[in-house]
Amino acid sequence: MKDGIAPALSGVVGMLLAGGRSARMGRDKALLPYRGRTLLEHMAALLQAGGACRVLLSGPPRAGYVSVPDRRPGLGPLGGIQAVAAALAGKAGCAQLLIVPVDMPALSAATLAALLADRDAAPACHYADHPLPLRLALDESVRARLERLVDDAHPSAERSLHAFCAALGARVLPIPDAVVDEFAALNTPQEWAAFRAAGDAVPAP
């Protein structure tokens, strides 16, 4: 890893979850201004700096990006992941997803790259107590599980990302003390203001 940027890895597709309603923020989080660009642009660049060879958005169409809308709106991150996994089925160069939400700008490229560097054979890998960011294998068993979970017959509790990762037997990495603050999600104007006031300490990718 050179200058905080991991080399792009063949078969790794970056997925940016940007389809939420941003109800608590009161405005579209993806379009918040951040370091001279939008939060959407920052997080897309971060995925590429972390090792993704290309980036897809989960959510509505956005100029300049390839977007995949949810097949069943209202299911949260799992619905977005299912839609993207289905859209990539059978396509070459799509072995893994590296998934981040649009509202975690403090994440570093090194933190993402560590998920891809872990050699455990588990179909998913994330950090303790945080199902995002997430490395997810795009194989038929994972796709089949996603398809089942978005079916109406499954209770909403089983559709949580935590439950999905646990059912897959995901590899869980400890969070180094030095990067604990990277995992703060910014859901409200107050959280966003506090984060900006703290100085945006994490170097931009």
Image (cartoon, rainbow, N blue to C red):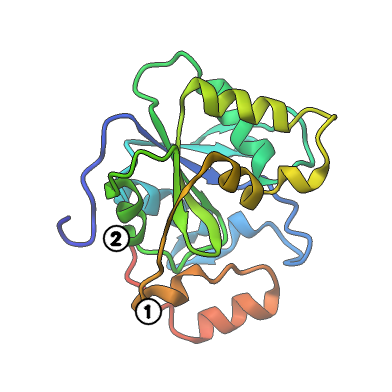
Q: Residues within 10 Å of mark 1 (few under 14, many from 20)?
A: few
What residue do we see at 77% from left, 66% from top? Answer: 24
Q: Who comes first in sequence, dot 1 or dot 2?
A: 2
Which residue is under mark 1?
177
Work out which quarter of the rendered image holds the C terminus and state it.
bottom left
Q: Which numbered dot is residue 6?
A: none
| Quadrant assignment, res 159 | top right
Residue furthest out toward the top: 90
Which residue is under mark 2?
110
In the image, residue 111 above or below residue 65: below
In the image, residue 1 above or below residue 88: below
Which secondary structure, mark 2? Answer: helix
In the picture, measured across the screen, residue 133 lies left or right of residue 158, that is left
Q: Does residue 95 appear in this view?
A: yes
Which secondary structure, mark 1? Answer: helix
Residue 165, percent across and down? 56, 46
Residue 134, percent across and down? 48, 49
**Tag count in the figure?**
2
Look at label 2 and name its amino acid. Ala
Look at label 1 and name its amino acid. Asp
Dots 1, 2 in contact, CB < 8 A: no
Residue 188, percent across and down? 70, 72
Between marks 1 and 2, how big is the CA–CA gap?
Answer: 14 Å
What residue do we see at 31% from left, 55% from top? Answer: 114
Work out which quarter of the rendered image holds the N terminus and state it.
bottom left
Q: Does residue 63 appear in this view?
A: no
Residue furthest out toward the left: 2
Name the mark nearer the viewer: 1 or 2.
Answer: 1
What residue do we see at 44% from left, 69% from top? Answer: 106
Q: How crowded is mark 2: few (under 14 residues within 10 Å), some or many (20 or more)?
A: some
